[in-house]
Image (cartoon, rainbow, N blue to C red):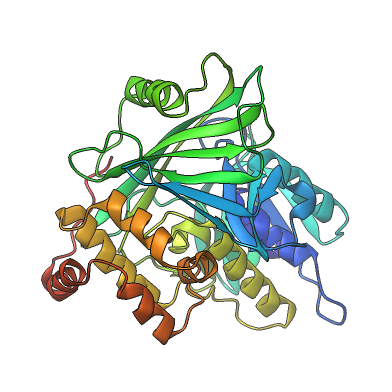
Amino acid sequence: MLEADVAIVGAGAAGLSLAHWLARRPAGTRPVTVVLLEAPPGPLRPPHRTWCYWETENGPYDAALTTSWRRLRVHGTDGHATERDIAPLRYKMLRSDDFETFVAHWTAGSPDTRRLTAAVETVEPVQGGAEVRARTADGRPVAVRARWVFDSRPPGSLPAARTTLLQHFHGWFVRHDRPVFDPDAVEFMDFRTPQPAHGLSFGYVLPTGRRHALVEYTEFSARVLPREAYEAALRRYTGSVLRLGRFEVTGTESGVIPMTDAVFARQSGPSVFRIGAASGATRPSTGFTFAAVQRQTRAVAAALHAGRRPLPPPAHRARSRVMDAVLLHALDSGRVDGAAFFAELFRRVPARRLLRFLDGRTGLHEDLSIGLRTPVLPMLRSALELPRLPRRPFPGP
C-alpha cells in the first residue's frame, strides 16, 4: 500500500498539469507528496494530442512548445480573409508528448512525486481520505491511499444537457517539397469548406515551418463522421482551397470534443475531486480546454501548498456559461449560421478583446458590446427559450 497526500488519476493534460504545479512548490509553503497514476499503453491511455492556447510570451511551458504565432487569420465562406495581430499574446502549440517530457523533468526533480503505471479500477472513500485500487500491465494489483484524490479520467457518459454538440476533427501532419505555408500566421477558422446542413465546418492550419503544417478538418455537429468522410474533406480542402498540390502525410490526429451546457460535478466523494474536461473545463462555445485546465490546476496546487481544502474552482464564470448555452442553442436550432457568426465576430471585434472574451476575462460592458455584434434577435429568442428546454442525456456520438 502506497500512501501520499495526493493521488492523481490520469496523465493527460489535467493530471500532468496538476503534477507540474505541485512540483513547483513556492518557497515557504508545505511539501505535498504525490502519486501520479498513468494508464499502461492501450485504450485507457490518452491518445497523442496537440493542444493550442493563447497567452503572453514567457509562459510556463514555452520550453516545450512546438512553435507559436502572433497572427490569426479567418476566412469567411465568401473567401474574405480577416487577419489580426494578437500581440502581446501568442497563439501556442504544444504536443502532448513534449508536455509529458517537460513535466517528467520537473517531477523527476521533486522528491515528493512518484509516477506509477497502472490502470485504475476503483476509487473509494476511506477514513481520512480515499483509496485508489489499480492493476499494473502485468496484472499485479496495487493500491494508493491518499488524503485527496484528483480524477481526470473522462466520464463514462455526459451529464444531461439542454444542448450538446460535438466538435470532431481529423488532421494531417503535412510535409511539402516547396515553401507553401506562411509560418507567421495560423489559419484559425477557414470556412471555405462545404457547410453541412446542420452545424458548421472549417479548415484549420497550424504551420510549423514553410514546408510543414498540421492541417485539420473540423465540424461542429451532433454526430461524428466515418473516417473516409474526414479524409475526403481533407483532400478537398488541401486540393481545392489551399491548392497545395502533392505533399506527404507524415502523421494524423483525430478527436471528439463535447460542446455542452451540461453541469459537470467537481466532486465525486468527500476527498475525491474531478479536474480538467471531466469537471467542465472545456469551453462550451469553442472546445478550448488547455488554458482553463491551467487556471484550475494552479489554483488546486496553491490550495494544497497552503494547507487549504483543494476544491477545484469552476473552470468558467457563470456568465460565460450562460452565454455559451445561448450560442449552443442558437447553433443547434439552426437559428444562427455558425460560419457567418464566427467569421463576422472575428471581423468586427478586436482580436485581443475577443480572445479575452473566449477566456472569460472580459467585463460585463465588454461582453455586452460583443453581444451587440452578434445576430441580436436570433440570440435573444434563443436566450428566452433556454429556461424552458429540458435537460436530456446525450445519446452518444
Which x, y percent locates residue 117? 68, 41
Report the front residue among 203 and 126: 203
Report the front residue among 203 and 143: 203
The N terminus lies in quadrant:
bottom right
Report the front residue among 143 and 179: 179
Which x, y percent locates residue 238? 46, 25
Which x, y percent locates residue 215? 51, 32
Q: Report whether residue 161 is seen.
A: no
Residue 208: image quadrant is top right
Q: Considering only vertical position in the picture, is 55 above or below 240?
A: below
Task: Residue at the far top: name it.
Answer: 246
The C terminus lies in quadrant:
top left
Q: Residue at x 45, y 49 (%)?
A: 74
Q: Residue at x 35, y 37 (%)?
A: 192
Q: Considering only vertical position in the picture, is 138 above or below 317?
A: above
Q: Considering only vertical position in the picture, is 135 above or below 83?
A: above
